[in-house]
Amino acid sequence: MKVLIVEDELALVELTSKALKKEGFIVETATDYPSAAEKLAVYSYDCVLLDVMLPGGSGLDLLRRLKADGNRANVIITSAKDSLDDKVTGLGLGADDYLAKPFHMAELVARMRSVARRSMNAGDFAFVFGNVSLEPDTGRVTVAGQDVLLLKKEFDILKYFIQRPEHIVDKAVLAEAVWGDHVDQADDFQFVYAQVKNLRKKLDGAGADIEIRSVYGFGYKLINR
Amino acid sequence: MKVLIVEDELALVELTSKALKKEGFIVETATDYPSAAEKLAVYSYDCVLLDVMLPGGSGLDLLRRLKADGNRANVIITSAKDSLDDKVTGLGLGADDYLAKPFHMAELVARMRSVARRSMNAGDFAFVFGNVSLEPDTGRVTVAGQDVLLLKKEFDILKYFIQRPEHIVDKAVLAEAVWGDHVDQADDFQFVYAQVKNLRKKLDGAGADIEIRSVYGFGYKLINR
DNA sequence: GTGGCATTATGAAAGTACTTATAGTGGAAG
DNA sequence: CTTCCACTATAAGTACTTTCATAATGCCAC
């Protein structure tokens, strides 16, 4: 699930981005109207978190344009002033939800989830790569149809990788996504190595045909061998 | 059964809330359109008692949005003016019942009950998992055909689990579903542990072939062993 | 190739977080 | 006033995570 955060207050962008990444969402950001419009024109997103007050134009205009273009992204608008006008206008323009600032991260995450679920067509679903499958809802992981028991961190790591097969994953980014705050300015990724090692052993021991390959100097990459 | 009261007249909220809580419903409240929409987006309710005239927007709009979102909550609309229009519009939009203000508490409770019953598939509906069955209507729980007596919280917890067999249930989410607001941002789930422990003992003592398993770091999971 | 530096891997120990157990307090209902 | 239930407090056991020390591997220059 790919999300675009459109917001000019950098501290808030930082915070929000962190929280959503931790949930496994793929997050990109834009801090003004023009760059947001550009990204939306070029890339496709599942969900847009859209501030109403933006440098360079109103978020509501952007929303209007999106809908006119037939963009399928779900839109959650946010507004600093707890303004009913914005809310009503926004929802009228086809926004999927409204969030008054300041909001709690937990709440944002819950709404995102509900958006994700709606767009994923409800029900249980599983990520699959090679002979490995992972179900976020039940916490179940199988290799070649056999259940494999993963601990929390191992599960989170695999969940992150399996959503981005074949993509290079920077260690710092992975750490940020899985551990969150714990990684303040760590230049030491021993804890990542340790967990990756355990995960590899379990996948390997179960006969997985996929592998977390190290890419020297960059990070990791989940590949199908 | 979790109910959201959407109503701006505080005295009425108070009264209604009290009456419903006394009946064993879990009650939350919202006093305007935005906060109601917010709660409905984030949490799930079995039933919504919805005033038509709200600060911030019309209850009918909210109802429309709910249905558009595929929200499964049953909706009972209330209206101060004994307006046929509201009634017709509301029911047309998919409301499950209509109540003209002022109403008697006894009547409200009766309608709630009937809505609850209807939503659970009329008649006596039971969730079944393994050799355990739970009837929301009658509060009856059986293990291998034998009645088992559960206290209220234990019942609510089992009900939550049995609707999501095999699914990971986060403690915070469970707490939210069973206890409602009570859990503001508790980082201490002793009260959950205590109840789960008792429920386990009863299920086990009755010879259930299902089990509330702890999944370290994730929460709980109802499994069939 | 070989040496040197940087990055990644490993196994075991130390540290931390999570879960359960038990007893008991407080409060609501009758 | 009494009883019963819901929750709290305390404590202890267990399981997971991170750290530490050390080893292995990859890259680059010569």
Image (tube, coloured by chain):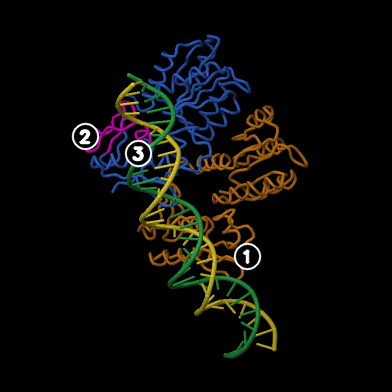
Chain colours: A orange, B blue, C green, D yellow
Magenta-span inclusion, residue B145: yes
A52 up-or-down from A5: above or below: above
Of residue B65 and residue A171, the one placed in the foreground of this image is A171
Q: Chain of mark 2?
A: B
Q: Say which residue label 3 marks.
A: B162
Q: Are marks 3 and 1 in contact (CB under 8 Å)?
A: no
Element at badge 2? strand
Q: How many C-alpha atoms fall within 10 Å of the one at disc 2: few (<14), some, or many (≥20)?
A: few
Quadrant in which the N terminus of chain B is drawn: top left
* x, y percent for residue A169: 58, 61
Task: Inspect the image, locate mark 2, and give the three-letter code of the amino acid beneath it.
Answer: Gln
Q: Say which residue label 2 marks.
A: B146
Location of residue A179 (image quadrant): bottom right
Task: Inspect the image, locate mark 3, and give the three-letter code of the amino acid beneath it.
Answer: Ile
Range covered by the magenta-colored residues: B132-157
Location of residue A77 (image quadrant): top right
Cα separation, mark 3 vs mark 1, equals: 45 Å
* x, y percent for residue A186: 62, 62
